[in-house]
Amino acid sequence: MELHRRADSRALLLLVGLCPAAAAATTIWSGLGMALVTLAVFAVSSFLLFRLRGTLPDRGRWLVMLVLSGALSAASGLALEACAPGLYGQIGAYLPLVAVNCTLVELVEGWAGIRPPLSQKVELGGAFAAVLAVTGLLREFLGAGSLFGAQILPDDMEALAFFAKAPGALLALALVVMCVNALGWTPSSLRPDGEDGKGGAV
Amino acid sequence: MTEFLVFALTAALVNCAVCGIFLKEGPLNLKAYASLGAATVFVTVCASAASAVLRDGLLVPMGLGYLSVPGYLLIAAAMVWLLERLLNACGLALSVPLPLTAVNSAALGCLVYHEQAGYGFTAAVRSGLGASVLFAVLLVVLAAIVNRLDGEALPRPVRGLPVLLLCGALISLALMGLTGLSF
């Protein structure tokens, strides 16, 4: 049996943006901050693209999305640097990757003919933020031995520094998604049509 | 900084595998992924050169450093367009059903890394060549791994995205191990 091969799987839209965001989620607050910035950039650029849809040729939409999301991610980086320098120090380096993933989602939506309604997109965004927050929490506890900034592990115990690095981000994300699948918490918008939500849906 | 580059390349690899799995029926075509890797090398090397010229020749002297990210995105897209035009002129076509934008995250990761590391023209081209060749090799490796994954043998919660992310984590470990090499 092969892995999921359903072109209408909503999970595709979620996981395309998860990878770079997971790198920035070293704590729960940076995970939530990265999720909010990603969702804001995606929402605003999608709205602007929707308003411009009538004047754009079909083939050029992805390029406009690239420019819009690039400008918005740069602007969000400048805003974060001015208003929240601590958060900018944690997630600022990964903001340019948000732009590429917004464009990729737009391309995949057009290619596979996926156009989820607004309610499903809001649900996807909530799931995205929740997964990143839990990933950040897991990485903070396992990689630094702290929770919400407070040191939990005693000084004579070393945390698993692996989880503070790039491979650990992907591993933590995989563990979180595995738990979501095992507990059957997959939102209806993430399940491929015709399948139940019990395990392995994402 | 190196960790950022490792993560950008890994994210691009996972995105390529995801697009291949969800948008094409049947096993992933390794020859197609090899050609996609070669296309990434071309795009990344050209984009590294162009971005170094843009940054050091125009943006920094004019105090427009905040426009670097949109500039890099446009440069990467322009290099993809240039590649498609060159292939059409030679009567070739990439046999990949994937948007080349998927590899732009690898190219963009290299460009942003060059800016963070303060590389000049020569260093940026050299670094872009090395990173993109590594990306191309690992892209074929990841596609081969995905083709050999047997979903029936995996526990149900692990199927789909988690096993892809686990493969990505292992690939990322390999990337981290190789970043210490220099010639």
Image (cartoon, rainbow, N blue to C red):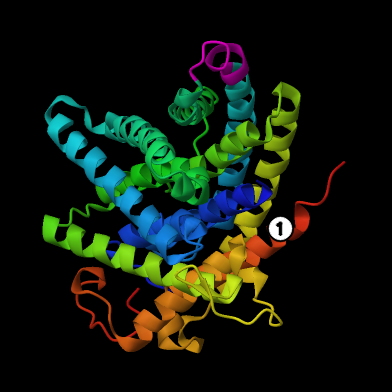
Tell me how many marks there are.
1
Q: Nearer the viewer, residue A133 or B152?
A: A133
Q: Nearer the viewer, residue B141 or B60?
A: B60
Kind of element beneath mark 1:
helix
Residue B84 screen position, x and y as percent: 48, 29
- Left or right, B77 with respect to A43, comes to right
Residue visible at 36% across and 38% down in the picture: A76
Residue visible at 13% across and 33% down in the picture: A51
Q: Which segment is the magenta one?
A: B54-64
Which image quadrant is residue B26 in?
bottom left
- Give the amino acid type for the residue marked by disc 1 in the picture: Met
Residue B1 screen position, x and y as percent: 65, 46
Residue visible at 45% across and 50% down in the picture: A87
Asked whether the viewer can see residue A174, the reply is yes
Residue A166 screen position, x and y as percent: 60, 60
- Which residue is the site of mark 1? B176
Asked if residue A26 is among those painted magenta in the image, a careful observer would answer no
- Left or right, B24 with respect to B176, comes to left
- Left or right, A37 with respect to B28, comes to left
Asked whether the viewer can see residue B100, the reply is no
